[in-house]
Amino acid sequence: MTSTPVLYTRKNPFPAKLVENRRLNLTGSEKETRHYVFSLSGSGFAYDVGDSIGVFAQNDPELVDQILQALRFSGDESVTNKEGESFTIREGLLQNFQITQPSRQFLEAIAQRSEGTDELKELLQSDRTKELEHYLWGMEVIDFLIDRPSIRFTPQEFAATLRKLQPRLYSIASSLKAFPESVHLVIATVRYESHGRPRKGVASTYLAERVTPNSAVPIFVHVAKGFRLPQNPVTPIIMIGPGTGVAPFRAYLQERHATGAPGRNWLFFGEQRFKCDFFYQEEFEFFQKVGVLTRFSTAFSRDQAHKIYVQHRLLENSKDIYAWLEEGAHLYVCGDAARMAKDVDVALHQIVATEGGKTPEQAAEYIEALRKEKRYKKDVY
Ligand code: NAP
């Protein structure tokens, strides 16, 4: 009798072994971007390039201890979450609750318990969203607890103010056709300081520091139908992916190489320094050599006095970019949403206007048409 294979989903994630955790930046870099490999053996996962992996991370145990101490909890007190599951408060803070960015409910509970006038109270009462946002910048749950030591919660009251810890999604950086038993991710480790305290990104530092070799991380596939390769293998593609944004494009190149897709491929990659931040240099050079990577444009922002970004490289190649678009190329952008994707969009408008002899309005229509035809796709964060 054959048993039905287990279906691993977001609700029932696959416990994946982390088999590789390697820093991609070399000595002299200001960044910490890591290459992770998870074994998919036994998962039954059948992802497509362009999809993402959801990772259920655990919070930093040091931060959990600081919160327990600030609230004078032992950690063994039992609490129940909104789904009705019970566990100790320590366990809850480690894997169930979001304990870094404060929820509205938490802020209101703090304001309610604060004595006298309090800036937080005022900002919450009135409709001053922008000022509240400014006040909260870089502030985490622990700051409110340390700054107001007289505030008291019961463990259950405190737990009830916290949101559920959500999984983090990362673009897949490999193709099953090249690596049938594993999935690769490229993740920048988030570390910074605010209000005098060092901060750590929850999932990125969990993976970088706290997952031991061969220990299992709960993961699932997040399907991204809107970020697939063109159906026709002949269609040319232009990929713009600075920093960790290069992840899905490494997967696209592996896929197009493995399937022998004849379509031309042009990659724009950007990082700070050629010497220490050129991730996957050898791999991309190999794809150039075998003719898969037809054109490769790099922008190293800190190798000279003035910044050079991917959009500068796009503008330098204005004529050819427009020609590729006219020949039916699909255009992909992945990476920073706040600035890069916006600046790239401006550059594209400029290219279409200049090379197509169009007014700004006509250029905007051209780009809108690309978007509608699903030929201008973004995966930005
Ligand atoms: P990244 O910080 O996006 O950097 C990759 C490359 O893009 C670097 O050479 C960087 O140059 C350059 N860059 C900076 N601004 C740019 C712009 N406006 N247009 C084009 N290129 C630009 O790479 P990452 O390691 O993937 O970033 C990881 C995560 O941090 C992402 O989630 C990103 O959204 C986030 N991030 C947030 C902020 C923020 O201020 N909130 C800033 C950066 C990144 P330089 O570093 O020399 O400027």
Image: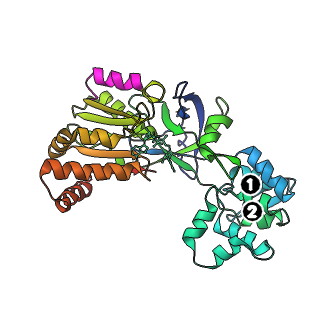
Q: Is residue 286 magenta?
A: yes
Whether residue 226 is visible:
no
Disc number at residue 159?
2
Residue 121 or residue 288, whichever sits in front: 121
Query: Residue at coordinates 61% horizontally, 79% vertically from top-left?
Result: 126
Mark 2 neighbour class, 10 Å CA radius: few under 14, some 14 to 19, many 20 or more: many
Residue 180 or residue 354, whichever sits in front: 354
- Start and end of the magenta stretch? 281-293
Q: Residue furthest front?
A: 305
Check whether the beta carbons of the residues at disc 1 and disc 2 lie within 8 A of each other: yes
- State the SS at label 2: helix
- Sequence-first tag of 1 and 2: 1
Q: Total number of numbered labels? A: 2
Image coords of residue 170 (percent x, y) = 49, 44
Query: Residue at coordinates 24% horizontally, 38% vertically from top-left?
Result: 316
Q: Is residue 191 magenta?
A: no
Badge 2 amino acid:
Ala
What residue is pinned by disc 1? 92
- Give the dominant element type of the magenta stretch: helix, strand or loop: helix
Residue 367 or residue 115, whichever sits in front: 115
Badge 1 amino acid:
Gly
